[in-house]
Structures are given as structure tokens and as C-alpha cells.
Image (tube, coloured by chain):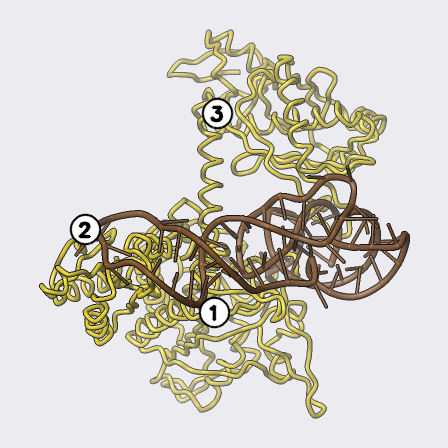
Amino acid sequence: MILEFEGQNYDIQEGITGIELLKAINKTSNDIIGISIDGIIYDLQTPIYHGGKLKLITKQDKESLDILRHSLAHIMAQALKEIYGDEKVHLGIGPTTEDGFFYDVEVEGHHISEDDLKTIEDKMREIIKRSLDIKRKELSREEALKFFENKKEVYKLDIINSLPSDAKISVYEQGDFVDLCRGPHIPNTALAGAFKLSSVAGAYWRGDASKPMLQRIYGIAFWTEKELEERLKLYEEAKKRDHRRLGKELELFTIDEQVGPGLIIWLPKGATLRQIMEDYLRKKHKDLNYQFVYTPHVGKSTLWETSGHLSYYKENMFPEMKIEEESYYVKPMNCPFHMAIYKSKIRSYKELPIKIAELGTVYRYEMSGVLHGLMRVRGFTQDDAHIFCKEEDVKDVIKETLELAFDVLKDFGFNDYQIFISTKPKDAIGTEENWQISEGALKESLETLGKTYEIDEGGGAFYGPKIDIKIKDAIGRFWQCSTIQFDFNLPERFDLTYIGEDNKKHRPYIIHRALLGSIERFTGVLIEHYAGNFPIWLSPIQVAIIPIADRHLEYAKEVFELLKAKNIRAYIDDRAERMNAKIRDNELKKIPIILVLGDKEASNKTVSIRSKYENLQGAVSIDDFIEKIYETIQNKA
RNA sequence: GCCGGUGUAGCUCAGUCGGUAGAGCGAGGCAUUCGUAAUGCCUAGGUCGUGGGUUCGAGUCCCAUCGCCGGCUCCA
């Protein structure tokens, strides 16, 4: 077979392993972790049977991290076996994750706790020090079954039995430890980089709640200690930004055990933030001729039967309520009500597109174990809208909607996105034409706007294709917020029509979209994105006024009234505290602008500004201050 | 819902071997009136998540239950 490497062709014998190959081409280095041939990754232990373009994978290549992490999972498994006994430890799967690895295991007679992690880590380091070669062996199915049966590795047997009949079955061996594995792996345990076991949690075998629950041990791994430290710092940073903590500290929201889990209580400051967000959204939507509506929180069961929710979504709905022989359900979505609004009169092609918007509060049953602060709740408000349009409007509507989404996200401080288009799945409703036109509009609009996107082929809902936008926050995490979905289902179910130019009835297209998604969740993302340091336009309190001594209180009130008259959210910190203490407290409360008022300011009618903003510094007149803060609010800086 | 952890003052946490609960911050009061990140003193505040049980005696041990935390699962 011919391997092409650095512009040269090498005639290499088939079945050669990477290690031998590297010797043959005179490239040996501990930095080389694997190779790829025509993009297929091999470790250095695997025999190669096909030629092509050879690339060396070094520690600098992203792919090498996967190899490292995979091997660390094995080393952890070996450590567990040595600590708890070969026969007692049953291995599940041990894949890599975004920044490390995990292994799902069952340990007979022992529950691994966080306290055990240190012991396991120590054993892992010991194994690494043994400098064990990691060897690959291929087995026949029979051999493999026999081997793992002897070892009582029930989960491995399950895996082997589910492999396709022509699959190559390989095991990797390091010292006494042998694990069923496809690879790739580092060649020797001594090459294992920096790692830390982070947590242990339960995980169903094969993700199936009817199967036994194994224990999943998570680890983080990188080639160098430095990278590991950086990652651990990121977790620290995320912890500092945790919206549950900041939400409490900044008095934005609370969740009361007595009120109920997953139900958000907006405290005055959080409510102010929410009102600002909602007012902003209303304005943005009205500019594009969206019509705002209000709809009830409950609807009769017949409504949910028509919409299909009772057959497809019931397990996520709060249970039925009976009133006067009728059954009602609390709404998990706003769609059926918006359908009712469309149907409230005969529609003409002349009034399309119709854009019905609502900040609609919905309730969904979420399992108790998944609730999480503002991010995962049982009651939330969607910035929801349904656009009813003609086929020829589809493109323009999608483009307009996307522009609005990017505009809004940008104003909230998000400029980096991952965009996904999900296309037609196997069991779909709607005509081929419906899907083509819709998918085409989604792709074309993104291209017109110069946005790159990925396609999740066949990942759409059965009722229509969609675009999901994930926003990147200040520390690099992605959050899915906006979604724009076609719905070919509801127009049929509710028998929606409009009268066309031809005086005949036609089916409208429905585009269902939310930009922030859930106001609750988006607020959580905002809190973490800004670490509680909101830009002035969003900050519940924009200005803290600190009179230095009581004799300055009168001037402070004067300034306060002037700000209040201009709709600037200010308050006077009139506590009997020293100025320094007040400055500290207001900094901790993350109030963006602090005005210190003393003799100088009172006599000159100025304010002394303390803020992080360059244009808002030092001593300026009140008018200047108001002008500058207005400018900053306007810029949403 | 499942696995594991956890629950002590408004918040963050200490509480040994089972012997009736403690700190800091915060809150209230008094004094201080101060120039860019913590002034001092005093005071109040707890059915130890809840309900059972063991015990002469339970914050501490056991059972149940609720909430929270980390995951899994789920997210037409």
C-alpha cells in the first residue's frame, strides 16, 4: 500500500502498526500520539491495511486529546479493578467528553463516593508510573464473548452482542488489565497527561431508565497541568457566576419551597429587569407590525385534543382539572390560543402575514430531578409569536425574523452564535413541497445574512423544519435560546384558511418562533453572562447616590429627583455609614454608577461619578451626567 | 422519576464520643458626619427542613417524607 507523507510516497507493507510505520519513515517522538490516513484516526498500536494521505497526530492536535482521555478512562477502570477487586467491578462504557472522560461502572458491595476519588486518582498515578505498554488485540466474536463471560463483564457482553456481525472486535491490554475497546489509545500509560477526577453520579445503563443504574465517574484531562488548571479555573468562574447564587445576592428572584419547586418568584429588582426586557421586546416587535395579545392560562381539553398536545405532549402537562363536568388543562404552550385568534374571523390574503405575539406564561411538568434555578423550571414566560403567511411570503418572513433575532441578541450582548438547521425526519407530516420551500427559506435567509450554520439532517420535528440559535456567553458556553420553526401540523388540525386572490380557501404557513425562548431562562443566562454586572440599560438600579455626610442629604435628594424625572433608576444610600462602607456595599451590589456627593458637589452643583465606564468618570455637572448616562443607555453599553 | 450527596439564625458556615446551640456577615438601636471598597459599642434573632422511632437524654443514631445540589432520564 502507498502512503503519502510530506509530499513523498512510501510503499509500506500492509498490516504494519503506527509505531513500526513511524520507524520506517524515521519519525519517532513521544509527541506523536497517533496517525490519520485519509482522515481516519488510528492509534500507534493498530495495524493499518489501507494506503492514503498520512498525517501525524501530535499533542498539539485536537484529536490527540480524545486519545489521551480515552486511555485515562481505561487507566481509571484498571485502578477501580485493583482497588475493589477484578471480579467485583463490572465495566460499562468509558467514553470521552468535551473536556475529559467518564466510565460507567458497577462495583459490587460498594458505593463510590466523592471521598473515594482521591484513592482512585492515586492508584491511577501509580499505574501511569508503571509505564505499561497499551497493546491492541483483535478477537473473534466467540473469543471475545468467552473472555468477558469468564470475567463476568455482563455489560461488555451486552455491548458485544449488540455489535453488527461484521464488526471487528478489539481489546486493549495494559498490564493485567484488558478492556473491550475500539480505541484509539496512547501507546503507553506513561504518556498520560494531567487529569483530575471531578465527580461521581448515577447513570442508567445505555441511558435506559428500565435498566440498572451504574455509577459514572467523571474526569477532566489535558496534556499539561497548565491546561487542566485553566479548565478548573473556568469551572470556578462558572461557579462564581452561578445565577442561583447571584440571583439571591442581588435580590432578583427566589424559589420558595412552599410555593413549589420550579416556580419562579420575581423579586422587585428582578421584576424591574424583566420589565425592561419585556418593554424592549414589545417595542422591537411592534416596529415590525407584530400584534400583541393576551390569552388564558387554561383551556378546555377539546382545545388540546385538536392541537394534538393531549396525544403527543401529555406527559409534560400538568394534570387535568375538572370543572362542571368539563376538563381543563393549564397551558404548556401558547399555540392553540393563537390559532383561536387567527380563527376569530375570516382572513384575507390581503392581511397576511399576520404576526401574533404574546409574552405567554406556560406551565410544563418537568421531573423533579431536572429543575435548575431559572434554567429549568415548571412555569415560564415565552416571547412567543406565530406568523401566519402565504407561501410566497415565507422567505421574507424568515429573513425578517432572523434579522430581528440577531438584532435582539446583539442588544443583550451576544455576538457569537452557533446556528443549526434541522431538516425533515423520517416520520414527517406536510407535503414534500412544504418542506422544500421551508428548508430552502431557512438556508437562503441565513446565507443572505452571511451567517454560517450546521445542518442536523433529519433532526427536525415531525411537523416542520427549524432553525435553532445558540448564543455564546462571556466564558465560552453556548445556550440555546432562539428557535424558528415551521408548523405544518396546526393549520391542518385547526383547519386554518385564508381567502386568496382567487376567492378560494388556502392553507396558511405557520412559523412559530421565540427569540429569547424563556424569559426566565434567558435572565439566568444574562446573569451568568454578565456575572451580575448588567449594562446600565438593564441594571435594576442604575445609580447609587452617596451623600458623604447628613448635611449633603438635601442635595442628594435634589439630584435624585432630577434623575427620577428622567426615568433614571436611582436611590439614595442614606444609611448612617461612612462613605467608604457605602461605596463598598454598592460596588458589591453591582450597581453600575455610584455618585458621591459632598461639599464640593453641593456648592458646584456637580456629581462625582465612580463607574467602570470611561465616559462616566470624575466630576461633572448634573446635566452632563444625565446626557452621558442617556447616551450609554442608548448604546446599551 | 432514578442514583448519590445534602439540609443548623435572613446569608455563609462551625457544632468532638448522644448530654438542651455558636461565629462572621446581615438586621435593629445608640454614638460617630466621615472624600472613593468594611467606624465603634449594644441588642434581638433557632421547634437544628418536616413527621415518626431508638434512648434517661437526639442537631448528632434509625426510618419515612419534603426541598436543594451533582448527574442520569426526559425535552412532540
Contact? badges 1 and 2 (CB < 8 Å): no
- For disc 1, the marked residue is A266
Question: Which one is closest to the eye, mark 3 or mark 2?
Answer: 2
- Chain bearing tag 3 is A
- For disc 3, the marked residue is A225
In front of the other: B3 or A440: B3
The image shows residue A485 at horizontal and vertical percentages of 47, 65
- Disc on res. A614: 2
In front of the other: A431 or A339: A339
Is A330 placed above or below A138 here? below
Q: Quadrant of the C terminus of chain A?
A: bottom left
> Which of the two labelled residues, at mark 1 and mark 3, occupies the earlier sequence position?
3
Is B38 placed above or below A129 here? below
Residue type of the residue flagged with mark 1: Trp
Q: Which chain is yellow?
A: A
- Seen at 18% across and 60% down, the residue is A598
Residue type of the residue flagged with mark 2: Glu
Can I make out residue A54 in this image?
Answer: no
* Mark 2 Cα shell of 10 Å, populated few (<14), some (14-19), many (≥20): few
Distance (Cα) linking label 3 and label 2: 38 Å
Q: Identify the hue of chain B.
A: brown
Residue type of the residue flagged with mark 3: Glu
Can I make out residue A452 in this image?
Answer: yes
Q: Determine the secondary structure under disc 3.
A: helix
